[in-house]
Image: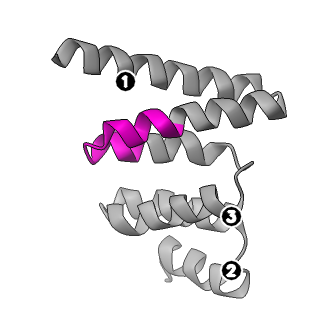
């Protein structure tokens, strides 16, 4: 039986510009600690489909996990800008929460 990752990768070869497939593949790669591959996919989505709002939260969290807090902060802020423009209040709220939590963590570590 073909794995989820193999199926997604195969579908992505057929539709290389499909942000949903890239996003789904990146999430599956995170489950097996393939952080660099997931990071590459997330960054590709952000750069080529900046209105794909789900990427900002997950990319920010991955940056946090990799110890790249400044990149995570920027990612959350960029996502807030996009979700404000798109009037996506739910995603905006999630990003604001992630931003506040990270800012508090950084402040507590000083």
Element assignment for label 1: helix
Is residue 30 shown left or right of residue 67? right
Marks 2 and 1, the one that precedes in the sequence: 2
Q: Nearer the viewer, residue 102 or 29?
A: 102
Tell me where residue 47 sits by quadrant: bottom right
Residue that appears at 52% across and 71% down: 4
Task: Name the magenta segment's main secondary structure.
Answer: helix
Q: Which mark is residue 27?
A: none
Query: What sort of colour scheme is used for the picture?
Result: one colour
State which mark lies toward you, 3 or 2: 3
Mark 2: secondary structure: loop
Q: Residue at x 58, y 61 (%)?
A: 24
Q: Are marks 3 and 2 in contact (CB under 8 Å)?
A: no
Tell me how far mark 2 sits from mark 1, CA to CA.
33 Å
- Give the percent coordinates (x, y) of residue 98: 47, 25
Which of the two residues, 61 or 11, is positioned nearer the viewer here?
Answer: 61
Label of residue 102 in the image: 1
Height in image: 89 above or below 20?
A: above
Magenta-span inclusion, residue 65: yes
The image shows residue 33, relative to residue 54, as above or below, that is: below
- The part of the chain drawn in magenta is 61-75
The image position of residue 5, as x and y in percent, is 49, 73
* Marks 2,1: beta carbons within 8 A: no
Q: Name the residue carrying label 3.
A: 48
Q: In front: mark 2 or mark 1?
A: 1
Q: Which residue is mark 2?
A: 16
């Amino acid at each position: 039986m073909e794995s989820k990752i193999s199926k997604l990768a195969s579908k992505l070869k057929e539709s290389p510009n499909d942000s949903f497939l890239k996003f789904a593949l990146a999430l599956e790669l995170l489950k097996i600690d393939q952080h660099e591959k997931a990071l590459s996919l997330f960054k590709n989505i952000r750069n080529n489909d900046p209105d794909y709002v789900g990427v900002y939260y997950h990319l920010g969290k991955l940056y946090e996990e990799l110890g790249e807090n400044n990149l995570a902060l920027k990612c959350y802020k960029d996502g807030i800008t996009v979700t404000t423009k798109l009037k996506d209040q739910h995603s905006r709220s999630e990003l604001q929460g992630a931003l506040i939590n990270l800012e508090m963590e950084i402040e507590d570590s000083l």
